[in-house]
Every structure is written in structure tokens, then in C-alpha cells.
Image (tube, helix red, strand yellow):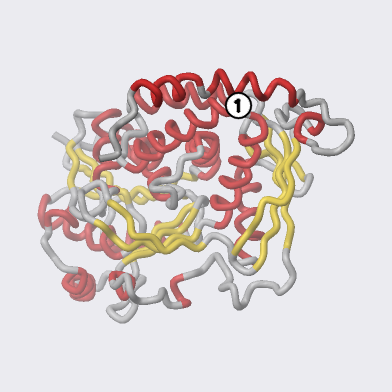
Amino acid sequence: MSDKVVLAYSGGLDTSVAIKWLEEKYGMDVIAFTVDVGGDRDLDFTQKKAAGVGAIKAVVADAKEELVREYIFPALQAGAVYQGTYSLATALSRPLMAKLQVEVALREGAAAIAHGCTGKGNDQVRFEVAAAALAPQLKVIAPAREWGMSREETIAYAKKHEIPIPITSASPYSIDENLWGRSIECGVLEDPWVEPPDDVFQWTNSPERAPDQPGYIELGFEQGLPVSVNGEVLTGLDLVNQVNEIAGRHGVGRVDHIEDRLVGIKSREIYEAPAATVMLAAHQALEAMTLSRGQLRFKRMVADEYAGLIYDGLWFSSHRNDLAAYVKSTQEYVTGSVRLKLHKGGFQIVGRKSPYSLYRHDLATYEKGDLFDQSAAPGFIQLWGLSTKVQSRIQTRNSA
């Protein structure tokens, strides 16, 4: 049996410690695998760091375009937002990372894969369920779940073995980020009464520091997919980056949320998601113009279900594939433009247009040119309320 393990390596505290720990505990050669899904990490430094800590090989994969095309945009079309708040940035990157990690493990002839997730988090489920769906023969090792060290003890272990780490006891944030957003937890944030310190946020201005004058952004969509910003056609990757910059400058996209984790506990999560916040709202506004009342009602239910599957690590399930087919069908006429006004941490939809709009001025107006036949209303109301009227006459309950 191979003695190699492919570790999903972020360069952070837990995965840096895991390289040494896997050597000590299992006697395995560690291949550090890092996926570039956007963010501010120096991947050359991360790769060198992995080798310096003891990995026999450090592999980096650029998956930014794939993340946008195959994961972020399908979730955007679905309107997937967990518990009405979280735009699923981390949750969307995990199935992609797990898929690529499995591919490396199979190519390298490794017997196992490993991750740095704790037993309290959601990511352990996302990695392991994805791996089970794609390569069930691979063993999965979860060092941070096995070693039983507290965060302080993990930091001490790193210092003992001279492992460089990006955090200190005074600033013990756990941060994950990709193109679609940043997730920040731990430290003082574990007290839900404490206001997040300014140093938590990196992508968004505080409302106080945001421009005094409002900014406008126009997003263009074709079949539910974002294609342009302010009239400029861009690739998906460039589009997300540009919207992140514009919305973040105006302080849009901060989220402070008490979240229900898959493992059954509540946690306090801080998110920064400028592009996701603006683009999800714009897409929803365009759907309101181009989908029927029945489509909108049912798609809201699908969106909640879709978001739950992503959050719960079930991206590679048949259920999600089935929902994705429905979502794709709904997007055929979701084409047009949406204009938003951004100001001091907030935003408004201030305009929308579509060649497939179901909004008709000649039916909606109260001015000259109104074509709505108001004489049809009495008969409609009589038939619409008939069942209620009959039931109330026959089944009237005694007030006593």
C-alpha cells in the first residue's frame, strides 16, 4: 500500500501543523495540495512553506475560472443563499477542491487524502462526502479532528516544531476566502455580543469610510448568467473581481450572522461578500420581471433546497443535479440589465429592463393608455372567493 497522503493545504495554522503531525502519527509522506480559488494568498510562498515544513511535494492548481463557471454561477442562477443570509462562498469552493484533491491523489498513487477541518465544522462533511462520491477507495484522515489539541495548544505545537504560522494568540482569527467571499471566525468573534473589530474586514470599507456620494452599477445578464458591468462585457472571473471592488468600496457586503451548522451547533460567522450580495440581489430583481408568479413561488423553494444541499456538502448528489436541471430551465428568459445604487454600506435596486419582461406598462398604468379591463374584476372576484363563501356559510363555527 502507498504511504503517501494528499493534504488539502491552505498554509494556515491547522494544515501547516498537519504536515508534521501526519509524519509523526502515520509515518506518511505528505503531498501538500493548494487550490487557487481567489483571495489574497501568496501561493508561491504557500508552496515553499509547505516544502519547508516537510511536504515531499507541493502542488498548486489554478481553479478560479472553474469555480466561477461550474459552481458560483450555477448557485447564483439558483438564488442559493443559506438561511437567507450566507451566500455560500466557502461551501461552494469545497466540492471543487475535493474533486481536484481526489484527482491528484489518484494521479500520485496516494492511499489517502487529508484535510485540516475540525470536528465542529461543516467543511469536514463537505470534503469527506465529496471524496466518498468520487473515490470511495481513498482513506480520509482528519488531523485536527484526531489530535485533540486546543487552538492555543496547536499554536504551541507549531512554535515547538518551528512551523511558521500567520496568526498569534492575540489575533487568532480563522479565515477562509475565495472569489465569492471571506469567512472569518474564532477569537473575540466567538462572543456574539462583541462588535467585530475593524481588522476583521479586508474587502469592504466601513460605512463611515465609504464615499459620501452614492455609486451606481449596472449588471447585464444573459439566461441568468452575469455577462457585463456598466456595459462592459467581461469574463466571469473579471466580472466578479470588478463587482467585488466596486461594491466593497461602498461598504456593501458585510454580514454578521448566527448560523446553524450541519453538526447541530450554532456559531457566529462574519462574512464579506460584496460581489455576491449585489449580484444575487440583481439576479433576483431580474427574475421578478421575467418569471411568472408560479415560477417565482416554486423557485424560492428550490433555492432554499439548493442552498441547503450546498451547505450540507451534497454538491455531487443526484438531488442537486435534478434541481440544477430545473434551475437551468427557469433561466431561459432571465436576460436583461439591472441598475443598483450603492451608498454607505447599503444598496437599492433602482432600475431593471429586459426584452422578455412580463411587466407591461399598458396594463399596469393608471394613466391614459390603460388597457386593463376593469369590468372583468367583479366576475373574477366572485369566482375566486366562491369556495370561501360556501365554506363560511356551511361550516360557520360557534363563537362560544
**Residue 65 appears at what percent x and percent y?**
55, 41
**Residue 203 appears at what percent x and percent y?**
54, 65
Left/right placement of residue 328 relative to residue 156 reads: right
Q: Is residue 331 visible?
A: yes
Q: Nearer the viewer, residue 96 or 29?
A: 96
Which quarter of the image is occupied by the N terminus? Answer: top left
- Figure quadrant of residue 226: top right
Image vertical order of residue 177 relative to residue 3, above or below: below
Left/right placement of residue 202 relative to residue 351 reads: left
- Residue positioned 27% across, 79% down in the render: 169
**Residue 201 appears at what percent x and percent y?**
48, 70
**Residue 80 appears at what percent x and percent y?**
46, 40
Which quarter of the image is occupied by the C terminus? Answer: top left
- Residue positioned 48% across, 22% down in the render: 326
Element class at badge 1: loop
- Residue positioned 29% across, 65% down in the render: 13
Q: Residue furthest bottom?
A: 170
Q: Is residue 48 visible?
A: no
Image vertical order of residue 342 relative to residue 68, above or below: below
Image vertical order of residue 225 relative to residue 145, above or below: above
The amino acid type found where label 1 is placed reads Ser
Q: Nearer the viewer, residue 52 or 394?
A: 394
- Residue positioned 40% across, 39% down in the render: 307
- Figure quadrant of residue 237: top right
Left/right placement of residue 324 relative to residue 28 reads: right
- Which residue is tagged 1? 292
